[in-house]
Image (spheres, rainbow, N blue to C red):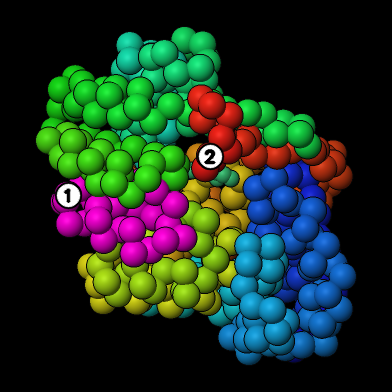
Amino acid sequence: MKITDAKVFVGGPGKNYVTLKIMTDQGVYGLGDATLNNRETLPAAYLRDYLIPNLIGKDPRNSEEIWQFFYRGAYFRGGPIAMAAYGAIDMALWDIKGKLANMPLYQLFGGKSRDGAMVYAHATGADLPDLMDSVARYVEQGYKAVRVQCGVPGMPTKGYAIPETKGGQGDFITDFSGIIPKTEIWDTDRYMRFMPDALADVRDRFGPDIKILHDVHHRLLPREAAEFAKAVEPVGLYWLEDPTPAEDQNALKLIRQHSTTPIAIGEVFNSIWDCNTLIEHELIDFIRIAVTYGGGITPVKRIVDLAGLHHVRTGFHGAPSHSPISMAAQHHLNAWAPNFGIQEYLVLGTPDCDALFPSEHVMENGMVNVSDAPGLGVDFDETEAAKYEYAEGSHPIVRLLDGTLWNY
Ligand code: KDG
Ligand code: MG
């Protein structure tokens, strides 16, 4: 069996999805997602210029060998652009494998460990009453877990992923438009004074059963993060996410020494080498790596197994930049993983998105039920794809009150 061709598509409804389609001499094709949020043209170019020419003629069933060939063969290892490109190839090869076996992927991993996988949505508010309305809407829809972000009074811009005006909610309201980034202003003191009480108010209002998550988005210094994690202990967070940038992994020890609040990290990680110290030293409780930026199913499944040895559960990144293809790969891993925790779920479930990526994965009552179709269980409509083209975008930047550049 041989790979005969592969194509890359960039575009989609409201997002620049990077979709890879690998064709074979037996008519079976596989799909992969290489969407690197706001740097989408780069994995697409890597696939077109270097990787696809090397795929032609290879046996698509040898997904491990092909992954090693690209990862080791590049000489310069890892990085988000390369790993997203390898990730798309790997997903597509697993998709082909599942279709050949006539089995959904979770069966090839070891079968189902659960019927539905719990997901969380993003509740946001320009202020606390606005946030309460947002959480209430998700609770009414049956969500068991919500990530809670709230505008901070007196801060020049409201904070990470917060609408500037009341009722201005969307699934994902950060302004990524345009090639020149928007600027957000951050004031740690105001955040530290306001947010622990705001989280406590959400707990008081919605009771003990709802799982509350909060994303600091790398904004605190390690000492501040330790203070914050300790202050929110009475809230009983399901997790505190990215309290501090994880480049300095030693810094995470300080948080552990001062608090038992569960910590989730890893959405910007690209390899097992980014994860292994935090996992082996048990400095985190949830690993957030995504199958796209993490290089595909093959390496991420290894990370899940390593995490399982150290009581670390999964909480894969699921921002709307991940197309339904990589989300499907995560649904299959979530159905199987003995150490599954939760899945972030924000796919733009619009009619346009469903038309581009037809699938039978079902999200209801805050749970995803994985499709039983062979392979990934997601298709890609090329006629629909022709309607879209690449739109320029960029991540906002963050500055402190005095203009100092800070962590987005
Ligand atoms: O590309 C950046 C986004 O994916 C990120 O800001 C989303 O932090 C995020 C999350 O937890 O979904
Ligand atoms: Mg995050």
In the rendered structure, the answer to whether residue 38 lies left or right of residue 399 reads right
Mark 1 Cβ and ligand 2 under 8 Å apart: no
Q: Earlier in the sequence, mark 1 or mark 2?
A: 1
Residue 56, by quadrant, is: bottom right
Along the horizontal axis of the image, is 326 left or right of 381?
left
Q: Amino acid at mark 2?
A: Trp
Stretch of the chain drawn in magenta:
239-265
Question: What residue sits right under mark 1 in the picture?
Answer: 259
Q: Distance of mark 1 from mark 2, alpha carbons? A: 25 Å
Number of marks in picture = 2
Q: Which residue is mark 2?
A: 406
Occupied quadrant, residue 199: top left
Residue at 57% over, 69% down: 296
Q: Is residue 317 visible?
A: yes
Marks 1 and 2: CB-CB under 8 Å? no
Q: Where residue 96 sits in the image (x, y, percent)?
A: 65, 74
Vertical comparison of 252 with 212: above or below: below
**Residue type at tag 1:** Ser
Disc number placed over residue 197 in the picture, else none: none
Q: Residue at x 64, y 78 (%)?
A: 77
Locate residue 336, reporting x and y percent: 36, 68
**Rendered residue at 51%/11% (across/down):** 165
From the viewer's perspective, is residue 154 above or below residue 323? above
- Disc 1 on helix, strand or loop? loop
Work out whether residue 298 or residue 271 is closer to the camera in this orientation and state it. 271
Q: Position of residue 309 (x, y in %)?
A: 26, 76
The residue drawn where x is 51% and y is 75% is 299
